[in-house]
Image (spheres, grey):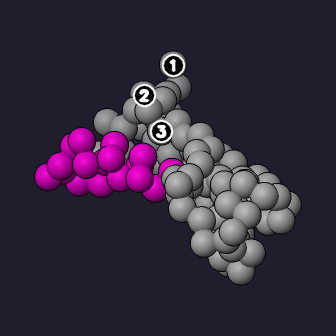
Amino acid sequence: MSTLENTNAFDYINVLGKAADAAWLRNDALVHNIANVNTPGYKRQDVDFESVLKRELHNSKYVSMDAKVDHLSTGRLQVGVHTDSAGYSYRLDGNNVDIDTENAELASNQIRYNGLMDSINREFQNLQSVMK
């Protein structure tokens, strides 16, 4: 067994990977919303990874972030697409997609995804420098 296998070196990378997967899934949902902006009765879809992560991190209050991530079960960081504000619509056709909001959310989510990928790459670079 190598030294890295005995450590928690990949804990942050695993969490970042789950966050990147959720951002990718959210991107698909936002694009789907934009495509259905004129579909009568369509309700917008969304993905909320942040709430799941927050809930899981609060399960271990009063400890350091490293300890929280160390004890975090990435298997419980599963998220899926959900219908957002299913009963709410300001339009007569029942559709609740606001194109301006969706475009802003899409741009924000793309920045988030790029930042997550940069963070994952930096974590791997840190591991590479340690192994040299």
Q: Position of residue 24 (x, y in %)?
A: 71, 52
Q: Residues within 10 Å of mark 3 (few under 14, many from 20)?
A: some
Q: Residues within 10 Å of mark 2 (few under 14, many from 20)?
A: few
- Disc assigned to residue 59: none
- The one nearer the camera, 78 or 61, is 78
Q: Residues within 10 Å of mark 1 (few under 14, many from 20)?
A: few
Q: Which residue is mark 2?
A: 6
In the picture provided, is 12 more to the left or to the right than 112? left
Q: Position of residue 41 (x, y in %)?
A: 72, 54
C-alpha distance separating marks 3 and 2:
23 Å
Q: Quadrant of residue 113?
A: bottom right
What span is in magenta? 49-67
Q: Quadrant of residue 67?
A: top left
The residue depicted at 73 percent of the width and 54 percent of the height is: 42
Check if mark 2's residue and mark 1's residue have beta carbons within 8 Å: yes
- Identify the residue at the far front of this view: 92
In the picture provided, is 109 more to the left or to the right than 5? right
- Identify the residue at the far left of this view: 62
Q: Which residue is mark 1?
A: 1
Q: Position of residue 72 (x, y in %)?
A: 36, 38
> Is residue 99 visible in this depiction of the protein?
yes
- Disc assigned to residue 77: 3
| Amino acid type at mark 1 | Met
| Amino acid type at mark 3 | Leu
The residue depicted at 59 percent of the width and 48 percent of the height is: 83
- Indicate the secondary structure of the residue bearing disc 1: loop
C-alpha distance separating marks 2 and 1:
7 Å
> Does residue 62 show up magenta in the picture?
yes
Q: Position of residue 101 (x, y in %)?
A: 66, 76
The residue depicted at 56 percent of the width and 52 percent of the height is: 86
Classify 40 as above or below 131: below
Magenta-drawn stretch, dominant element (helix, strand or loop): helix
